[in-house]
Amino acid sequence: RSDGPRPAGARSDGPRPGGPRQDGPRPGGYGGPRSGGGTMGGRPPSLNHMARPAAPVVPDPETAKPHARTAPPVAARAAVVDDEEGARTIRRPGVAAKPAALPKTPKAAPGEEKRRGRLTLANATSGEDERTRSLAAFRRRNQRLMGHRQVEQKEKIAREVIIPETITIQELANRMSERAVDVIKMLMKQGQMHKITDVIDSDSAQLIAEELGHTVKRVAESDVEEGLFDTPDVDDNLVTRPPVVTIMGHVDHGKTSLLDAIRKTNVVSGEAGGITQHIGAYQVTSPLGGKITFIDTPGHAAFTAMRARGAKVTDIVVLVVAADDGVMPQTIEAINHAQAAGVPLIVAINKVDKPDANPQRVRTELLQHSIVVESMGGETLEFEVSAKTGDGLETLLEGLQLQAEILELKANAERSAEGTVIEAKLDRGRGPVATVLVQRGTLRTGDIVVAGAEWGRVRALINDLGTNVKEAGPSVPVEVLGFNGTPEAGDRVAVVESEARAREVTEYRTRQKRERQAARMGSAGRTLADMMHDLKAGAGRKEFPLVVRADVQGSAEAIVGALEKVGNEEVAARIIQAGVGGISESDVTLAEASNAIILAFNVRAHKEAREAAERAGIEIRYYNIIYDLVDDVKAAMSGLLAPTLREERLGEAQILEVFNVSKVGKIAGCRVLDGVVQRGAHVRLIRDNVVIHEGRLSQLKRFKDDAREVTSGQECGMSFESYQDMRVGDQIECYRVEEVKRSL
């Protein structure tokens, strides 16, 4: 090798095979003294024990001999610990580190896939296995090659989008299977800023859906009720059903007595009969063998709505007229209801056993209302019956059965049930109870039913005998337990397929009911002129606040209707709340807040409510007859009426002289011309036939003494309260004012 001079700063880096490392001449020449101290020649002791490596020795180019041989490496070695590998590596200062030998990779067992680590030069040249391209790399290569190509657009699917009256943007996007962001962008193009949760109207939603290429089907909220009622029946499934007969007539004409007589003769002796007292509907067997469903209606004038309801659900109306009383106001009303419903009428002339009975008079009076009975050449059947003796009852039942056969009453029993709520109440032990007359289909335990704004699952069905039944067919009245609230009497009942549908229908109806109440209570849709007219008409009008609780819905409805008719332009009853069931603490709180009286009809207050009413001083009045309730409210409201003032003329006097008395004022000397003049009475001072003052007579003297009254032809002295301008010749008219109480 050539050991010639090298350029300054040059040195040999890296390992040299088969020879010592040459680091160039050190200061002082070959074998000379070292700059860092130490012994002459030989290898210096190891410095690995030192914590800090020694500073590297830099050769001096000036003192170095040009042809000096390189000495073996004697530089101090520094200990450098490799933390990663855990092995100790000794490295000379100024010299590159020797690469550590790679650990040999253990060969994988046959059949096992060899795990490949990082690709290094040693691994690449080892030739142990052939490097292959991974699946991910192949995919990346394909993606790079196809990156700039256009991805084929998927074919857009046009959908039929159902849009209600209002819809959220999120729901609209979901129904179209579009991104909500695209919908919001389209709205922003139209100048509308919306969030994803905002509600838009159906017109905007339709515009967007059609712009995106979808077809639109508009639905209204009322569409939830479609298909609930009036689905046509198939003729193949129709079977004969019992007739529904409603008993109508005037008060005390013997309707309930007639039904009791029929029930005693036709219903089994073990009948509980409790249900008939509440619902007024039950079934009996006619002498011809068929079933007949009876509905009893009250005859009081207040129960007009209940009678109208009875006429709507019925097939035949039996008009009960007392032979000794004739046609009365509620009889005429019942005739009108039957004619409005378009159902056939049968006349039952009751109380024919009475000595003063005159059935012919009844037939004649009915002619005035376009009812011609058979005995007088008409088409209306009439039967003379007696509820007391039982005469004619079987003939009446046979006539009803024949009339039903003429009508050919049929229904499909194999479909989902439909019916009408005849009566509803709140039972403390059983919850809301509705008496339902099934009209079509079969109602079964477990069915989900909807009635008005209430729904529920049928927990139990109780028939007219008070026993539990599993199902009720057409024309069968049953009590239904399981509603989540008390439905209103007259609501139509329908069986639905799921709870979701039931909730949907009832939520819509509840919302409608709330909006109707708000419209009735509020001033929406009224002009300023209407409001001014109401203010003028109602100025000084007094209100009588009431809270009404009744045993059944029909009674509450009748009481409210009767009380709303009571009153005039000065005073009126204001029904704050009317409901069914016992009086609770919330009723007492409501009455206390509005200074109202609580009227309880056939119900009682709970113990807590009674104690709360005593503490708050709220009056609770109990009734079981509607006459008494209406009469009491009338009397109480009459007390709010301002009394009528009536004048009674006493006498007349004329002023002859006026005297001015110091510290007293002016006193008129008068002569009584007619009647009598009394101290403290009302007087009018008339001058030239014009009333110039009205007041009271403060002093009346006869000579020097005070007088209580002065009769005609006598002279007296008078002075008036707060009035001194009296003149000779004025006329004085004396009168007394009486208050007369008014009544409704």
Image (cartoon, helix red, strand yellow):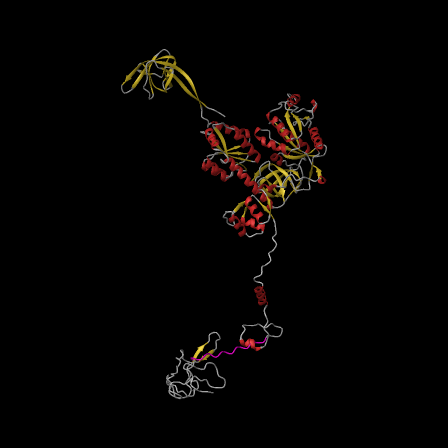
- What secondary structure is the stretch in magenta mostly built from? loop
323 in the magenta segment: no
* Left or right: residue 265 compared with residue 510: right
Residue 575, position in %: x, y?
51, 34
Counting the numbered discs, the total is: 0
Residue 403, position in %: x, y?
70, 30
Residue segment shown in magenta: 93-107
Q: Nearer the viewer, residue 509 or 190?
A: 190
Image vertical order of residue 95 relative to residue 498, above or below: below
Q: Residue at x 53, y 45 (%)?
A: 200
* Left or right: residue 582 compared with residue 275: left
Image vertical order of residue 564 relative to residue 658, above or below: below
102 in the magenta segment: yes
Find the residue positioned furthest to the left.
662
Residue 147, position in %: x, y?
57, 62
* Left or right: residue 374 compared with residue 68: right
Residue 418, position in %: x, y?
64, 39
Among the 4 quarters of the image, the one containing residue 738: top left
Residue 183 showing in the rendered view: yes
Among the 4 quarters of the image, the one containing residue 50: bottom left
Image vertical order of residue 102 relative to residue 414, above or below: below
Q: Nearer the viewer, residue 424 or 645?
A: 645
Residue 430 showing in the rendered view: no
Q: Residue at x 60, y 39 (%)?
A: 434
